Amino acid sequence: MQNSEAPATVQLFPAGALRALMADLFAAAGVSRRGANRVAEILVEADLQGLPSHGVMQAEGYLTRLKCGAASARDEAEIVVDNGCAMVLDAHDMLGQLSADQAMRLAVAKAKQFGAGIVAVRRGCHFGAAGYYADIAADEDCIGLVMANTSPVMPAPGGRERLVGTNPISVAIPTEREPHVVLDMATTEGSVAKVRIAARDGKTLPGNWAVRQDGTPTTDPNEALKGLLLPSGGPKGFGLSLVADLMGGLLSSGAWGAGVYGNAFGLSKPHNSSHLFIAIHTGHFRPSEDFRHEAQQAADRIRASQRVDGTDRIYVPGERKWETRRASDDKVKLEMKQVETLLALSADFGINPDAFLASVR
């Protein structure tokens, strides 16, 4: 590899150049070129939508898992159950973006045939933003529902033992015009990735995000990572997390609760998470165009609703990310630390990053 220096300040990199570098890295780690391209596309898309916690910053962990054998380089999950509208996939610890993409597309195909498709996944890895996969279903006239479990970081109300994870839930509802209505939420007040970003950047957390191991509140992200994260909405968030944990884990015959390792045991142990993908085809209930029309009316009603003083605009779930993506000019903002990490990974995997670095000049 030729010697290259990273930009000295925050830079805007063309998404195409970043995708190319990401794809080269994953291909060098043993993933097929097709799979590497898809993972790169999904990671960069998260950054373009303003979700850096689910974007290319995750690549280092994924590549470390691939290198040490904690993740598999395969690009297709094994179908172990195919029973009408119900399927179970064994991901064999492959990259979560690939198994999630496969699972949702299978769910959509089943939904078009049966009205609903339900695909549970076991032995999965972190797959990034759940809303990305729910939106795949919405593009196909389906309501998309995605759930996943992660390593336990959240106690039950009144407790101080890690029982369930940040367990994301996403629902996408198709509308006549973009964006679709897309709910995408962690069941904790803040995700682990966002806490890690705060720790990296030396920032404090909101007061309702975390507690120390003894249950006392903290705004220190480093203490939060050693302690517990609090549920979104109190007992309601815990309940939603538990439901996501059990639905994915039990339907797939996969891991749940303390059986989900995530990053809690480092990057040398498989993630071992369970996922659930549901697609409901609107055309099996009524004409899809009628469904989309009324869904659009509902979204427009929210946008046009009365505002309190000081509020300039009311958004529909998912709209902010969609607008961020449109305003990005297909460029991703990377900080110096991220660029340095990408250069180190390039050196580790024998990739020449000069074309990537030159893309900002």
Image (tube, helix red, strand yellow):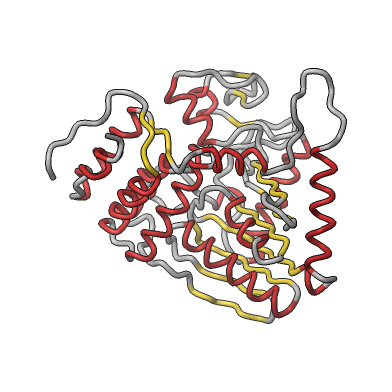
Can you tell which quarter of the image residue 89 is in?
Answer: bottom right
Evaluate whether residue 81 shows in this view. Answer: yes
- Count the marks: how many? 0
Residue 287 is situated, as x and y percent measured from the top left of the image, at 82, 71
Q: Please tell me in which quadrant of the rendered image residue 111 appears.
A: bottom right
Q: In the drawing, does residue 219 fall left or right of residue 17?
A: right
Looking at the figure, which quarter contains the C terminus?
top left
Q: Residue at x 34, y 50 (%)?
A: 22
The extreme right residue here reads 306
| Residue 308 x, y percent position in the rendering | 84, 22
Along the line of sight, which residue is nearer the eye, 256 or 309? Answer: 309
258 shown above or below 274: above
Residue 276 drawn at (x, y percent): 63, 61
Residue occupying image coordinates x 33% and y 66%: 32
The correct choice, above or below, for 237 with respect to 291 in the image is: above
Q: Is residue 314 shown above or below 67?
A: above
Considering every residue shown, the one lying at the far left of the view is: 2
Q: Which residue shows up at 71% across the image and 37% down it? A: 156
Q: Is residue 347 left or right of residue 209?
A: left
Residue 165 visible in image: no
Q: Position of residue 222 (x, y in %)?
A: 48, 23
Left or right position of 344 against 283: left
The quarter of the picture where the N terminus appears is top left
Residue at point 82%, 18% (across, down) = 309
